[in-house]
Amino acid sequence: MAFLSFYKKPQPRGYNTQTYYIEDTSDTSPDYFSITEFPQSVGGGRYIVKFKGNGSNLRIGKSIDVELLDANGDNMYVELLDYVDRFNNYYAMFEVYDTTPQGVATMYFVGEAVVNQSGRAVPQQQQDRYNLRWQKTLNVLPFERNTADLIFNQAPNIDIVQVLVPERALISQISSSTIGTTYSVYTSSINDFSIISSNFQGFDRSFASSKDILDTRIQSILLNPEQKSITQNSVDSSTRTKDVDIENGYFRNYTNRFGTVLKSASGSFKKDFLGGSFSFYDAQSVPTNISPTIPTNYTISGSLGGQLQTYTANIVEVLSNNEIRLSKPLEVRTLDSVSKQRGYTTTFQIHQASNFTGSIAYLPNNPSYVTSSIVSQSFLEVSFYDIKPISGELYRLKAYYKRGIATGEYKLIYDHVVNSLEYLTDAEYPNQTTYAKREVDARLIGHFTEQLIANTYWDQRVETPNQIYLATMPSIESSSLSDSLPLHADYTHSALLTTKVNQNYTADQIYTLGFNLTLDPNTELEIYMGSDPLNLNTNQPNPYPRAFLKDPNQELTRYSSAYNRFGKYIGKVLNNNSTSKRYGRVEFDFETDGDGFGRPIFRSRTIRQANITGSAYLSEIGISPIAITGFNPNLIQFAIPFAEEITNILALSQSLDFKIEYFDYTGKQSEFTTFLNDLTVNFKTEIPSNGCQDEITLQLVSVATPQESY
């Protein structure tokens, strides 16, 4: 299977190395390309350069081209769009990914001129070729917010479905009046914790983002119990990084910004610490062993104990019960008495610290779950597909309604920040990303915060050359990876893990499957997306539509079927070493083969023949439409409760008119607005369910075209 990548890699054109008859060194090329808008600095996402083209000096009927090189001299994706706005501007669209290097990029425009800059005709030998080049630089900061205007050149597809959903009730062992407000503090023994900041260079020097940009992992639960963003200007500062062990996928690299690790010799860390805060117990409990030692020419501002006592860091990742990642290094302010600028204040970073008493404040796990009652409620579920603006990032949606084909004002029915859908939940509606341990209306079934989640929503099976059979669900463990499920395998027995029920996927959409992973020595983990039952029959009919088709069998020496037993092959992670390896967050992008049902399938196996056993440890498994910094998800879904007024309107007219408005993160509205007129809502036959809930789909209405608002 070819490697699917969201990141486009254009072929080099070489416009930077060639020579041209005319080198246009003007700022906006008024004589030739007539650049009307050019960004000076860009963050992640899609951006545009606007130009008109001077038809008097460019040869009519001949093409122009564009090339964009990043700070390393590699090609960035850029495209001349078949689009002209109402001011007669043409657009060159380019994309900045989280893998794009920070620094100065250079854009080149080339074309065929008919006159030179003195107004004289171009010589015959310089005609019928690109004889003109214009170039300009821009600053690329891939982790800054997308600040471009929100512009669409094609309509997102919109489906509106009326669904009847059993009402969900929260059942909790904790009083609802105390949820989100009761905090616990864990205090260590004096010789348990140690802090390590290996080769960490500091915030500004090691990470390409301003301090006004807050990372999504440093939203402390002490300020924000439900883990909602406390700023609209939050981005994910981790980078997707290739690894030789990972085929077709990436690992999330947090060390670019978060290089400080807190270790516990006693293994006292737990998943509940995620989002909490670490500090020293008091001024007498700060580290007494630090490395490197502070040079003699550095004078500590105040006292060492007084400074360290004020140190507080958020916990951004729980790696295992022995290690957690902190949001910032341990530093002290000093005065340099030797430098030319005597008395110069600087920051001294401590790389190792021990012999202290630490405190962790955190919100304990809420052992709550959600059930469905026999009372049902109607929702209008609105789904957006192929949301691909040519510029900017969609941050907020507003939906309005009124009586179908009637005069009058639209009324606001929905106003919310765009969230990526999480597919691995115990319910379809509403399908939004949350944390499993918080009070939510859907549980994240890929977060193994308790054994009940693994037993209720997942199946483990054993696969041999001759059979596939159900196995006992292993116990959750945290020694190798916090709150993880181990998949034990040997050379002849592979371990399979999959969800008990399917999820409903949309055709021709790219999704991301992500999970935390640790592999034992000589062990590999294969990843599939399957739409068929797990058994030896690889060609059996399926009673429901398939989202994924099976790939050919690559293990003909193991079994002879033409197709593999599992599904669409996504990728694998292979630890071909004699020691275990923690990979952190691993991500794989995949594309659906059609509208239909499917589920993730993990296969753990060993790669040595002689008496080798090994395990793969997985935690925090999630599936969502692909979304990276600066790019909104291509698929968005939200549910609107049926208000009494809507019910009354439908009783009279049987139809509704809708209006959808689009906004960026600053609150600026896009010029493009979607109108859906005269939508009829009628009952429709029930469609197959994924088994999560008893849900009835009543009516599907789709596709409206964005129109410009004047």
Image (spheres, grey):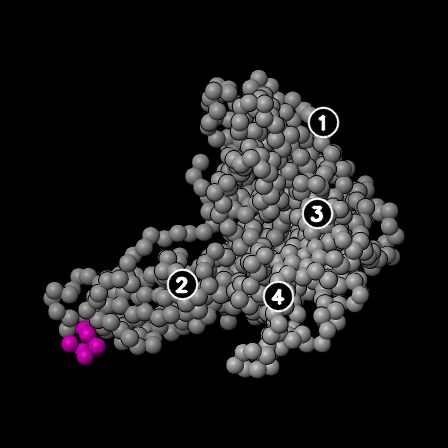
- Per the image, the residue denoted by label 1 is 472
* Left or right of residue 362, residue 214 in this image: left
Disc 4 element: strand
Check contact, mark 2 vs mark 1: CB within 8 A. Answer: no
Task: Give how far across and how far down residue 196 sits, in percent.
Answer: 64, 56
From the viewer's perspective, is the residue at label 1 or at label 3 nearer?
3
Check contact, mark 3 vs mark 4: CB within 8 A. Answer: no
- Per the image, the residue denoted by label 2 is 71
Hey, what amino acid is under mark 4?
Answer: Gln
Rounded to the nearest angstrom, the CA distance separating label 3 from label 4 is 23 Å
Is residue 658 visible to the viewer in this orientation of the structure? no
Question: Is the magenta region chiefly helix, strand or loop?
Answer: loop
The first of marks 1 and 4 along the sequence is 4
Q: Which region shows up in magenta? A: 115-120
- Per the image, the residue denoted by label 4 is 349
- Per the image, the residue denoted by label 3 is 322
Quarter assignment of residue 600: top right
